[in-house]
Amino acid sequence: MSARQQLRDLVDQIPEDQVHTAYRILLALTADPVLLSLLTAPPDDEPYTEEQQRRDLEALERHRRGESIPHEQVLKEFGL
């Protein structure tokens, strides 16, 4: 049996209350090449270094102190 036929068989087994969700997933896979590339990308296997962790924690602390740029300001700067 071909993979396409197996997929059709699976679609026939989807519970009625999940059909719309399955439709949206299949639509995304066929309509959005960026989403498809994200869904099929290999996992990130690069280590999360101590330096990266330190810088992320520093950025989080700056944000908590109110030293970050508000989202609205960033959007405005980019004309969005």
Image: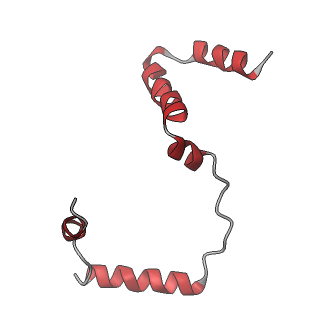
Q: Residue at x 64, y 63 (%)?
A: 44
Q: Return the x and y of residue 49 as percentages of the image width and height.
A: 61, 81
Which quadrant is home to the C terminus? bottom left
Which quadrant is home to the N terminus? top right
Residue 60 as seen in the image, left or right of residue 26: left
Q: Return the x and y of residue 57 as percentages of the image width and height.
A: 43, 82
Q: Nearer the viewer, residue 20 or 73?
A: 73
Residue 62 as seen in the image, left or right of residue 42: left
Q: Nearer the viewer, residue 7 or 74?
A: 74
Residue 40, compared with residue 4, is above or below; it is below
Q: Residue at x 47, y 19 (%)?
A: 19
**Colouring rule applied to residues:** secondary structure
Q: Return the x and y of residue 2 as percentages of the image width and height.
A: 78, 18
How many labels were placed on the picture? 0
Q: Residue at x 59, y 17 (%)?
A: 11
Q: Return the x and y of residue 68 as percentages of the image width and height.
A: 27, 79
Residue 54, compared with residue 28, is above or below; it is below
Q: Residue furthest right?
A: 1
Q: Residue furthest front?
A: 79
Residue 53, compared with residue 10, is above or below; it is below
Name the quadrant containing residue 46: bottom right
Name the quadrant containing residue 20: top left
Q: Residue at x 63, y 51 (%)?
A: 41
Name the quadrant containing residue 8: top right
